[in-house]
Amino acid sequence: MSAEVLILAALFLLVGFLYSSVGHAGASGYLAVMGLWGMSAAMMKPTSLALNMVVAVIGTVQFVSAGHFRWRLFWPFAVMSIPLAFVGGMVKLPPEVYKPLIGAVLLFSAWRLWVGSLKREEPKTQLPPLPVALGAGAALGFASGLTGTGGGIFLSPLILLCKWAGPKETAAASVVFILVNSISGFAGAVSKGATLPGGIWVWCVAAAAGGLAGSYLGARRFGGGTLRRLLAIVLVVAGCALVWEGIRLATKRENGASPPSAQT
């Protein structure tokens, strides 16, 4: 087993722990690690979705068993998101587009995590209108498949900003949403020939270990305000680095040099 595989495993374990504590599975964090490590865009999406599925299963069990899951909040978002996550997973973007797109996702994630960490009181909530939830689920599903995330990083802030549920219920709905969309997006990516790197099983075990500890603490012990702020700082650094890498690749293409193919 190479040192590279072990280093990435340690990083994925940390990401799984941090994200699962706030009801996410870690896709944007895995993408940040892989992007900064220099992994190809073609490998990044299926790998992040595979790791997402493992951690989301654990998070789903923890948050559901803790009594935070509400079916009425979840299903309107999920019913349209699942088929569109499959479609999004089939789309392959060149690295000069994919990397800055992921960087923007990370920066958005950082902003939402930081803002969420500052809130002290839970506002009164009301379930979303059905047509709104169906439309939002469709858009978020496609975005999740396209970017290689489960969509929870988009769903959580939407639910909280619109006051459709409290933090714990939002985390529970998000982690199940992440699970179904990660499965659908992964299936779409595989249908278009996506493959996984050799170290995937080691990384899945590491992410699962982190996800088990983080989701248990997040569902039953703490709210994760400090973890959210630390994670936000990490994502800002990673997001800026990926945006810069995308700009560099785009500039290289304009100057006549071909950037690495998204299929490698």
Image (tube, grey):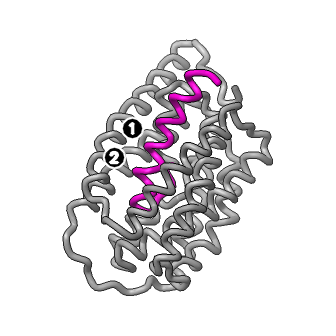
Q: Amino acid at mark 2?
A: Leu
Q: Tell me which residue sits at (61%, 54%) in the image.
A: 54
Dividing the picture into quadrants, the one containing residue 86 is bottom right
Magenta-span inclusion, residue 83: no
Tell me, for residue 239, which label it has, or none. Answer: 1
Q: SS for tag 1?
A: helix
* Horizontal side, residue 252 vs residue 90: left or right: left
The C terminus is located in which quarter? top right
- Ranked by sequence position, the earlier of labels 1 and 2 is 2
Tell me, for residue 231, which label it has, or none. Answer: 2
Dividing the picture into quadrants, the one containing residue 222 is bottom left
Q: Which residues are magenta?
A: 1-26
Q: Position of residue 191 (x, y in %)?
A: 80, 48
Dividing the picture into quadrants, the one containing residue 142 is bottom right
Q: Tell me which residue sits at (55%, 37%) in the image.
A: 98
Which mark lies nearer to you, 1 or 2? 2
Q: Position of residue 111 (x, y in %)?
A: 30, 52
So how many labels did they put on this image? 2
Q: Amino acid at mark 1?
A: Gly
Q: Position of residue 172 (x, y in %)?
A: 47, 71
Q: Tell me which residue sits at (36%, 41%) in the image.
A: 235
* Horizontal side, residue 166 vs residue 4: left or right: left
Q: Position of residue 221 (x, y in %)?
A: 34, 67
58 up-or-down from 14: above or below: below
184 up-or-down from 11: above or below: below
Graded by Cα atoms within 10 Å as few (under 14), some (14 to 19) or many (20 or more), the crowding at tag 1 reads many
